[in-house]
Image: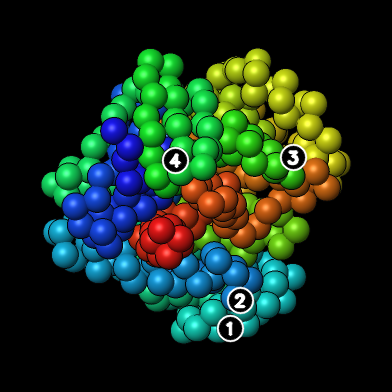
């Protein structure tokens, strides 16, 4: 049998793509291949659960356009399928007067992206959030929270109802594009498909190379450590609390996130991981380390971010350093408030120059489309990403 479509990767982007393909072409045969024993095991299930508004992204970029559409699409999807979500808003806090200039630049970018932003002085910030201090803040009203694993679970059920076939526990070891089909081989079987979509997240560069694509980047894994505040702190903030980020770094800084279950998560930081899928602090994968150690872009990236990298290592080794970052805007937090919570891994594409690929990256051949870089806000943008991919594939039929 030759399938009409095959999607590799059962994270939220792969699920959204499969769902949209079956919606756009009812009755099509579709196979979704996932290497884990169930779907949404990696980045989808190890994030902050934020429905991002699209504040930071370069106007006109994939991230800016797809995040804006995705924020509303995610809320609509939750409404249609009775998935709990909340629009609680986000405060971007300037911890010092020096950060106010950066804050104003972010406000201008947010306005360019079509967002409504309120600028708060220190007094108004403290009035809205009595436990938070800062020289000022931006309030983004449209930011929300959701459990993306619940969203992914609903997508999975919709794919099955629409006739899609899902196989888990199959690690893909070969992808070969031929004249009229693509052959996908796992460690136990193989399939043929007319069109292939690869949404492999942390393994995206490896599968692109496996498929014969020439790539000028490598996925470098960054471990994001979270802590959970004790239940006594659950009512201590009303909104999400983010620091004004350093524009020279690819990460947003340690923040406070209200979760849909009522708890509060702190984090993540961003420390180089010793394993692409190593969620435990001491996880180690020799292949992963060897690959990025031999990659020139990795060392160029390290040189560019050496000081901040050392600080991240310090904070992961000593919880007091992590707490110090939090106390800049939440001064009453104590060391015992930082309770254990599962970590995440960010798949960051880094070019040979040592620069991060900031935007979503897609590569297409006559019969394949690879999602090569889809870090945050990919969960928020998953539905329009799936729609865009489906449109591209259907136009090329």
Relative to 135, 380 lies left or right: left
Q: Quadrant of residue 98?
A: bottom right
Marks 3 & 1, CB-CB < 8 Å contact: no
Residue positioned 68% across, 53% down in the render: 357
- Which residue is the site of mark 3? 309
Q: Work out whether 169 lies above or below 272.
A: above
Separation of residues labelled 2 and 3 (CA atoms): 28 Å
Q: Which of 210 and 317 is in front in this view?
A: 210
Separation of residues labelled 1 and 4 (CA atoms): 43 Å
Q: Which mark is residue 206?
A: none
- Which residue is the site of mark 1? 112
Percent across and percent down for residue 336 are 45, 35
Q: Residue 59 carries which label?
A: 2
Residue positioned 58% across, 83% down in the render: 112
Residue 169: in sight, yes or no? yes
Dot 4 falls on a residue whose secondary structure is loop
Separation of residues labelled 4 and 3 (CA atoms): 45 Å
Of tags 3 and 1, the one toward the viewer is 1
Percent across and percent down for residue 327 are 57, 51
Residue positioned 41% across, 38% down in the render: 8
- Which residue is the site of mark 4? 181
Percent across and percent down for residue 182 are 46, 38
If you read the primary sequence from the N terminus, does the residue marked by circle 4 or circle 3 appear first? 4
């Amino acid at each position: 049998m030759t399938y009409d479509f095959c999607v590799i990767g059962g994270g939220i982007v792969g699920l959204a793509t499969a769902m949209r393909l079956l919606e756009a072409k009812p009755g099509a045969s579709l196979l979704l291949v996932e290497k884990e024993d169930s779907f949404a095991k990696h980045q989808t299930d190890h994030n902050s659960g934020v429905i991002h508004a699209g504040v930071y992204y370069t106007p006109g970029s994939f991230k800016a356009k797809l995040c804006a559409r995705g924020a509303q699409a995610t809320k609509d999807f939750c409404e249609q399928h009775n998935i709990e979500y909340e629009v609680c808003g986000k405060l971007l806090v300037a911890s010092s007067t020096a950060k106010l200039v950066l804050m104003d630049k972010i406000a201008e970018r947010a306005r360019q992206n079509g967002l409504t932003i309120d600028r708060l002085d220190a007094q108004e910030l403290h009035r809205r959030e009595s436990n938070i201090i800062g020289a000022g803040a931006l309030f983004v009203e449209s930011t929300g929270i959701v459990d993306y694993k619940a969203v992914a679970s609903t997508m999975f059920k919709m794919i099955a109802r629409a006739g899609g076939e899902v196989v888990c526990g199959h690690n893909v070891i070969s992808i070969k594009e031929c004249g009229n089909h693509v052959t996908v081989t796992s460690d136990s079987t193989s399939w043929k498909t007319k069109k292939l979509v690869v949404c492999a997240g942390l393994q995206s560069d490896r599968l692109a190379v496996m498929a014969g694509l020439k790539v000028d980047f490598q996925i470098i894994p960054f471990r994001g450590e979270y802590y959970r505040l004790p239940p006594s702190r659950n009512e201590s903030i009303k909104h999400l609390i983010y620091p004004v980020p350093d524009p020279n770094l690819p990460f947003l800084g340690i923040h406070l996130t209200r979760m849909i279950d009522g708890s509060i998560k702190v984090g993540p930081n961003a420390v180089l991981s010793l394993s692409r899928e190593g969620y435990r602090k001491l996880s180690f994968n020799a292949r992963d380390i060897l690959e990025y150690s031999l990659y020139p872009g990795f060392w160029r990236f390290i040189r560019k971010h050496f000081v901040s990298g050392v600080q991240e290592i310090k904070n992961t080794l000593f919880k007091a350093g992590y707490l110090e970052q939090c106390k800049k805007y939440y001064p009453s937090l104590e060391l015992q408030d930082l309770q254990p919570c599962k970590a995440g891994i960010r798949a960051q594409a880094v070019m040979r120059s040592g620069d991060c690929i900031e935007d979503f990256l897609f590569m297409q051949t006559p019969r394949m489309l690879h999602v090569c870089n889809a870090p945050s806000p990919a969960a928020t943008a998953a539905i329009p990403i799936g729609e865009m991919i489906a449109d591209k594939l259907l136009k090329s039929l």
